[in-house]
Image: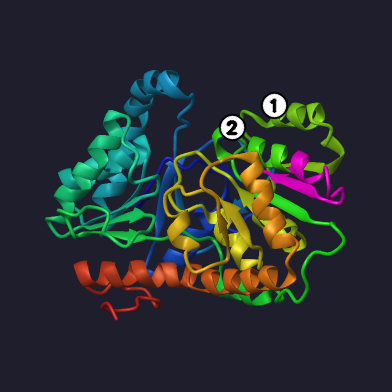
Amino acid sequence: MVVSHKECWRSPDSATGWATDGGFALQMAALAPLFEELRVCVPEVPRRAVGEVAFLPPILIDPLPTLEGDGWRRRVATVAWLARALPQIDRAVRRADLVHAPIPGDVGSLGMALAVAHRRPLFVRHCGNWFVRRTRAEQAWPWFMAWRAGRGDVMLATGGADAPPHPDHPGIAWIFSSSLTGAELAAVPERTSAPTGGAVRLAIACRQDERKGTGIAIRALAELRRELDGVTLDVLGSGPDLEAFRALADELGVAGAVTFHGQVGHGDVLAVLRAADLFVFPTRASEGFPKAVLEALACGLPVVTTPVSVLPTLLRDGGGIVVPEADPNLVADAVRALAMDADRYLAASQQAREIASRYTLEAWRDEIGCRLHDAYGPLGGPADPGPSR
């Protein structure tokens, strides 16, 4: 039983009748073959047809009441929501052989607590930035995971580094994040030529929040177009600062060179990335393991990014350039260094694909499956990989 805050909605276009957005449904589809049955207990919301990703059979959905609002409004609404949702989550946890709680999130936290209360085996996957602990919840989750790891439950932190997530609790391990299958990776042709004539197509895909770096990318674009008037930028995703970024592009005189795609589906994201030349991600935000960066690498795109969370580790063997900080001039210089040197560009592109090949959904599933098998024994599904190899 997966207990998560990830919102879902009814979709007549889905074989299961349910859909969501982002990579969650793809990850659940990867995990499902490990088990005899996989159920997902998540809040239901009105349908969002743009960019939806269907849940695939044999996944079963146990919809929870809608949990609305953000910030303090969400905390107030949670009190009333709990009265309706708690009995349902409690029943779901009671009938589960294994509870998976992705966090951060209030619903996943509730699933963790109920799994402990009912003595169910528990698998927690921390999907945020493991090193950012500003709130009480962000401080409590690592403590809880250390406690449960010491009792044999499977505790994974999304990210990666040479040292384990918690030096005093080796039971907590790193796990990467992916939404890309091996077949999708194999379907992308290898790049055999570098951008020419100053025609460089940049792309960024993320939540359109100021800290994610889209504003830096637009300012870098304006700098680049002073000498390379063929440089363009594709912006994928929606968010609270999207209109501000449109205004910024207009203010800097590059609106005609920026395409704002808004929220699009996974297939559309991959199509834009395949047509691009470079991926820019000058983030200052809290990152775990950005799936969009991995998808860009899989498409053979050299990546220009910042030293945030796992990104320096991901690119330490090549595949792009990590600039010291989210500065438009540094980003523009890195783009020039890659786009104007064909040999360097093609070497980075080849290395990008090699990096991505290590992080497919199948590899993600098998890594998780081995850890679950080691902790709890056979899982019952046809894809159970057995003990750690």
Q: Residue at x 49, y 69 (%)?
A: 317
Distance from Cα at disc 2 to Cα at disc 1: 9 Å
Tag 2 secondary structure: helix
Which is more toward the observer, 37 or 143?
A: 143
Residue that extends furthest to the bottom in the rendered view of this protein: 389
Instruction: Please indicate, yes or no, whether residue 53 appears anywhere in the rendered image.
Output: yes
Q: Residues within 10 Å of mark 2 (few under 14, many from 20)?
A: some
Image quarter of the N terminus: bottom left
Which is more toward the observer, 173 or 180?
A: 173
Indicate the amino acid at tag 1: Ala
For marks 2 and 1, the one nearer the N-term is 2
Indicate the amino acid at tag 2: Glu
User: Was residue 59 drawn as part of the magenta stretch in this picture?
Assistant: no
Q: Which residue is mark 2?
A: 210
Q: Which residues are magenta?
A: 221-237
Q: Residue at x 67, y 42 (%)?
A: 217
84 lies above or below 24? above
Decide: marks 2, 1 in contact (CB < 8 A)?
yes
Image quarter of the C terminus: bottom left
| Location of residue 220 in the rendering, given as x and y in whole percent from the top left corner | 70, 42
| Location of residue 270 in the rendering, given as x and y in whole percent from the top left corner | 68, 60
The image quadrant that residue 156 belongs to is: bottom left
The image quadrant that residue 154 belongs to is: bottom left
83 lies above or below 8? above
Q: Does 353 sit left or right of 252 as displayed? A: left
Residue that extends furthest to the left in the rendered view of this protein: 151
Count the marks: 2
Q: Residues within 10 Å of mark 1 (few under 14, many from 20)?
A: some
Residue 244 disc label: 1
